[in-house]
Structure formats: structure tokens, C-alpha cells
Image: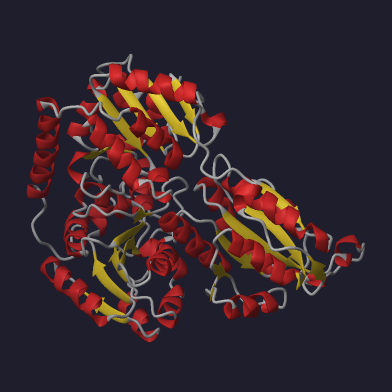
Amino acid sequence: MSVKLYERVLDLMQAEGIDTIFGIPDPSFLHLFTEAERRGMRVITPHHEEAGAFMAEAMYKVTGKPVVCVGNQGPGVANLLPAAVNARKEYTPIIFIGGQRSNIADQRVRRGRIQYINQPQHFKSSMKYVGVIEYEDQVDEIFHEAFRQALSGEPGPVFIEYPMGMIMRELDLPPPPAPETYRLVEPSAGSKEVERALELIKASENPIILVGHGVFVSRGHEVVGELSRALECPIIQTSGGCSYIRGLEERMFPYGFSPAGNEAVHKSDLVIAIGTEIGEPVHHGKLGHWNKGNVDRKWIYVERDAVAMGVNRPIDVPLVGDLRAVVPQLVEGLAGAQRERTPEFDALLEKHAQHRKERDAQLPPPSVPVHPSVFAYEVTKAFPKDAVFVRDGGALTIFAWEYNQQKPTDLVWNQNFGHLGTGLPYAIGAQLAVGDSQRVMLYSSDSAFLFHISEIETAVRLKLPIICVVGCDYAWGLEVRAYRTIVGPESAETGSHWGKVRLDKIAEGFGAHGEYVENAEDIGPAIERALASGKPAVVQIPIDGKENAGQPPNYDEYKTWYTDFSY
């Protein structure tokens, strides 16, 4: 079969189930983009390569499939770098492809080469793999290694350089092989380890399941739900695992932020950790709440990366493999051993429900501007029940942890790296992933939203009806708090404030729907109008900057995540 190199690249992508490419047109990619569209693939062109990579990342977070983002030689590739660093920290298997001048430019000693830098060296510290196509017959080898590295063990990004001088080269190759011929697909755990895990599970009296974002990214909702039903036990959510399993919402407690969840941790004699790091947000599995009650509890860890085992705490039974394969092994081993629901478990469910009622009953009275806790409550109460929930921002996000009224199957946010500005691109990528089956709702602060505001035009152009609800204190809220705490209440708060920008008018200028709301009782109707418009929409709500920069709910708990947080 005779194909051009750019056609073979598409063949290799499609063999991995990739149907969308993110990037800005450039001579390196014009043939590839044209052929991709001819094949029925989607080519999504953002206004900034970084935003395009964030869109790709959100697609992965909602589908569990690898994604592709390209950058033009020189500045386009440079624009990918921040997103590449973020992708590594967020464990996102993005296949970054960088255009480059013909290979001869690399060996020239001359100065003043236009749009030329040694691109791979800038990616090596952040990528799981960096490959350069120097000869056309390397294309299969390099792409297979890229997919192998990106999707094996701990997921992560890779970078492939794609020189312009090769894109039209002819290759005589057979059809691309299936992924399972060159990489492990959903590896399961060893039988001995599974038997040891089942022994611990059957001997335990108070097991809990600790879930992270990996459960939801891998689309492991159902299999983890089956395990929880078999054990009739609580599910403790890490800060990254804030999504919910449909039908089990009432038994899912956020780690550290729920009295019932903390009690379940204290009393547990067995922890089954799935799809999560055992890092700072869960006190390394041995400090904080783990240091209370039954401190001799056992640990089973379901993790793809063998190197992660025992790093922060001892693990009694390591189950190395893909949770989509390993958790069913446990469920199958427990067949016929269904636990009875205990009165103690029911008491935990009632305690958590009561905590939520008491918390919501203590909301501040209506005010203008709106109190951030009221903002979080009213905004999330108005979100459709089946919506994909995207979150971005600093202080305002902490209020959402406490006052969120939704229990979404998918909550997309930047948990590990804390990269502001991902929200709007994430919302676009998520809407591309779910199509017309769900609405995507973005909860954001203005400081985060302003990073990539030009991408509203992308949403309008692609007819993506995302709803962006933006709380505006016209400041860096957490930084204002830091100034007041560290430097003093009379601090000048240098660089932390800006003018009162009308984001709703900017949205209308792009062709989107805009709403401006000052009163809490008007938030719900404004979101309803935005949903009814069928357009991308921005709902702007001024919030109380003093309160947003004050003491967010559960901030003392949040501070314990950081060993170097001194204020």
C-alpha cells in the first residue's frame, strides 16, 4: 500500500481511535488537516495553541481516549510548552506533534535561522517520550513508541517532531496494526496478588474505597460502583475524584471536608485506593485523618504504575494494572459474598446528609455584590442535573467544594497543577466530547476566565452551547488574601486588582449570549435564559471581593495539604 507520510500519520492516529485534531493551520499541517477532514475527522482550530491543548485534555478527561494537538514550527510549538508541562502533571496522554523546518536546518551552523529552535530539548523534561522523524520509514516506530509510552503505566504526554521536508514522502506499508499488537491494553493484576487482596477484603469489617480522578477519566464508574455495592461501604473522594457514580451519590464523601467521611476514614480497617495518587491532598495516606482511629488499617492499591507502589506509605497488597481490568477481578472474586448493609453505614449516610443541610442553612443573607458562598450555592443549584461540570479559579473554587449542589458524573478541573485559565478551553473540549447528549457548565472566577477569553469565538464558530458562569471580584482573590495575611491588612496589594470589565458584553461581541446579574435571586433565571438561547453564553455575576479574599470554607483543612504552607 503506497501512502504519503502525512497519510500514514493519520492512519496511525485512527488505529488508536483518535478522531479529532487540535491545532492552528500551518504549511507543516495543511495536507494533514485537509486529508483528516476528508476522512471525517474533526479539525479544531483555537485562537491559541495552549488553549487547543487544554481542549484536547478535556476530551481525554471525559472520554478516556488519547488525544492529538499540533503546533507550528517555532512560536506555535513554544505556545504548546505551558500546556505540555500541565499535561504531564495532570497525567494526560496528549500526543503533541510539532512542525519543524526541513532537517537540513538543524545542522546549519549559520545564525539568524527564522522560526527555528531545537524544539525537542525544550520538551524532554516534561514528556514521557520525545521522538524526531528523521527518516520517513521511522514513522510507525516513532508513533507506536509514543502511544506505548503515553498509555502505559502512569499516563502522560509525548512529543513528536514532524519536519516539513518529509510530509510528502512516499511509503509502501501494510495497513497499521491494532494497538494490542504493540502495547499492553488494559493489563490485569496477577492472580496471587488478587487472592491476597480478596483475603484482606473478606476479613475486613469496615472497608472504604478511596477514589481519584483516574476512576472517572478511565470511565470506571460502573466497575467501581459494583465493588462498592458488593462491599456496602463508603466511597471517599479525593479532591481530584469529585465526580460521582450514578446511583451511589449518597455514599460518596469528600476526603477532609465531610464529618461523615472523616469518621469513615478513622474507623476503617481496610482502604482500597483506586485511580489516585496517595499524595498531599490525602496526607500521604498516613497523616491527617489517617492518623486517627484505626491507624493499623490495611491498604490495597490499584495502580497502573508499579513505581508508585510504596512511595508515600507502605502498601499491603499492590495490584498493578488498569483499574478497568483489576476491579472486575475483585468483583468476580467476591461473587456470592455480598455484605449486608450495617446500621453504622446508615448512620454515616444520615450524618453526611445532615451536615449538608446544616451547612446550606447557614448561608449568608442576600447581598449586592453576591457573597461567594451564595454564588456557589445558587449557580450550582441552577445547573442541569446531568450536566458536565467544569471548574476553574482559586478562592471561588474552594467555595464550590463546600456549597456545590450538584453531583455530576463528570467534574473536569485542573486538580494536580492548579493551572488557571483551563476552564473555558476545558468546557469547549468537554462539549466536543459529549456532543448533543449533555450540556457543559463552566463555573469560573474572572481571573481564570480572562486567560483565554478569545476562545468564546471558537465556541460560537463551532456552535458549542457551553454556559460560562463567571464570578467577578475584579481581582486575584487568593493573592489578595495572601497580601493581607502575610504583608498586612493595609498592604497595597500590588498587581492584584483590575477594572470592572463587562464580560457579558464581550461575549455578545463574539456572537454569544450574555447576561449580567447582581442579585442572588436572579442567578437561576439568568442561567435558564442562557440555556434556552442554545448559544455559548456568559453569565457575569459580581461577587463580594472582601469575602472572597477572606477565610474560605474549610481553608484550614486545605492548608494541611502543603507541608510548606506557613500562613
Which sits in the foreground, 470 or 65?
65
Vertical placement of residue 384 versus 481, above or below: below
The residue furthest front is: 336
Residue 95 is situated, as x and y percent measured from the top left of the image, at 61, 57
Q: Quadrant of residue 387?
A: bottom left
User: Residue at the spot x=13%, y=44% of the render?
Assistant: 356
In the picture, measured across the screen, residue 213 lies left or right of residue 72, that is left
Vertical placement of residue 314 versus 73, above or below: above
- Number of residue marks: 0
In the picture, measured across the screen, residue 16 lies left or right of residue 7, that is left
Q: Quadrant of the C terminus?
A: top left
In the picture, measured across the screen, residue 334 lies left or right of residue 146, that is left
Which sits in the foreground, 372 or 247?
247
Residue 561 is situated, as x and y percent measured from the top left of the image, at 38, 34
Vertical placement of residue 508 versus 528, above or below: below
Which sits in the foreground, 353 or 228?
228
Vertical placement of residue 473 versus 350, above or below: below
Q: Quadrant of residue 6?
A: bottom right
- For the rendered model, the colour scheme is secondary structure
Q: Quadrant of the N terminus?
A: bottom right
Residue 66 is situated, as x and y percent measured from the top left of the image, at 54, 56
Q: Can see residue 542?
A: yes
User: Residue at the spot x=21%, y=44% of the render?
Assistant: 248
Which sits in the foreground, 79 or 343?
343
